[in-house]
Amino acid sequence: MSLAEKILAGNLRATARLITLIDDGNPLAVPELKRLYPATGRAIILGITGPPGAGKSTLTDQLIVDFRRRGLTVAVVAIDPTSHLSGGAVLGDRVRMGRHATDPGVFIRSLGTRGHLGGLSRSTHDVVNVFDAMGKEIIIIETVGVGQDEIEITRAAHTSLVVMVPGLGDEVQAIKAGVLEIADLFVVNKADRSGAEKTASELKTLVEMNHPGPGEWWPPVLMTIANQNQGMAELAEQIFAHVEYLKSSGRWQHFEENRTRTHLAGLLRDFYLRQVEERLNHDQACSELVAGVAARHIDPYTALEQLVGSAPAIPRGSP
C-alpha cells in the first residue's frame, strides 16, 4: 500500500511519515498528495493567532477538549518559530497539549516556520490537506505568534480567532495596525486579569467602527480564562455559528476558491524560487553575474533583467 492508501485507511504512522516528507520538501511527497487530494475539502479549518503570551496553546488545548466532547475528531498544526542561526525550532506546543497524546481522535503536529513570514509554515496547506483526507473533522492552525503581520491565516482558515490579553500595552493601536481585518472572532483571554473588561470594550468599539455591512458577519468579542476552562463552550458555539454563516451565505465556496488560489500561488512561488536559487548557486554565468554586482560593475536591477531575459552579459573589468 502507498502512504496515501494507508492514510485514507487511518494509519497514523503513515500520516506522520508523509508530513515529515512534506516538511522536508522531499519530492516523494508529491505523488502521495496527488492521491489524497480528491478526499479533501470536508474539514472545518480554524485559525488561532495573537501576540506571544496570549495563551493560544492553552486555548487550543481546551478547544480540543470541547470538540472531542462533541464527538468530533481534531488535528492541530502548531507553527513554531525557527532559529535563523541553527535552523532549529522550539516545537513546544505538543508539550502543552500532551494530555491528548493517547487519544486516537487527536493528531498534533508542530511545524517550524523555516524563515517563512506571515505566521505559517510553507508546509501548512499541504499538511492541512493530509489531515483533511485522513478524516479529521476540525483542523486547528495555531500561528507562530510573532506580531501583527500574520494575515496569512485568513487565507488558510475558514474561521480566524484573534486572541488578546489585557496588559499588553495599547490594544487599540495594535488592532488598528491590521489585526481587526483578520478576525472572525475576538477572544480576550486571561479575563481574570485587571483591565480585561476595558480591552473587551475597546475591541467591541472598534468592531462597531468598522461597520460590517448588511448580511456580513459581525465579529463577536468573547472573554475566556482558558486555563480554568471558562468561556470555552461559548467560544466553540460561536465558531460553529461562523461556519454556519459561511455555508448559508455562500461564502464557504468563495473561501475555498481563495484558499486554493493562495495554495497554488505558494506552490508556484516555491517552485520558481528553488529554480532561481539552484541557478544562482550552481550556474557559472549566474555566479559571474553575482560577482559583477558585488564588484559594482553592474547594478542589481540590470542583473535581474538579464536573469529573467537572455543569457547574462557581464561587463568585464578589474576587480
Image: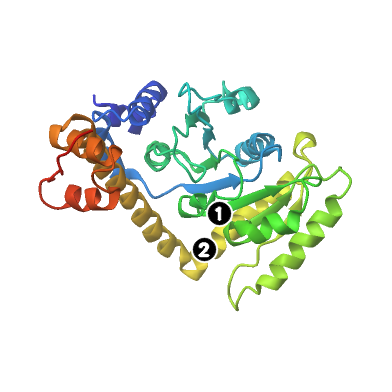
Callout count: 2
For disc 2, the neighbor class at 10 Å (few under 14, some 14 to 19, many from 20) is some
Judging by the rendered image, the residue that carries numbered circle 2 is 246
Residue 183 in view? no
Q: What residue appears at the point 76 percent right and 34 percent down from the top-left corner?
A: 227
- For the N terminus, give its image quadrant: top left
Residue 228 image offset from top left, x and y in percent: 80, 35
Residue 314 image offset from top left, x and y in percent: 15, 43
- Check the image and report above or below for 173 versus 150: below
Q: Which mark is residue 36?
A: none
Judging by the rendered image, the residue that carries numbered circle 1 is 159
For disc 1, the neighbor class at 10 Å (few under 14, some 14 to 19, many from 20) is many
Q: What residue appears at the point 28 percent right and 42 percent down from the top-left corner?
A: 296
Q: Residue furthest right?
A: 194
Which secondary structure lies at badge 1? Answer: strand
Residue 312 image offset from top left, x and y in percent: 13, 45
- Check the image and report above or below for 15 versus 249: above
Pointers 1 and 2 in contact (C-beta within 8 Å): yes
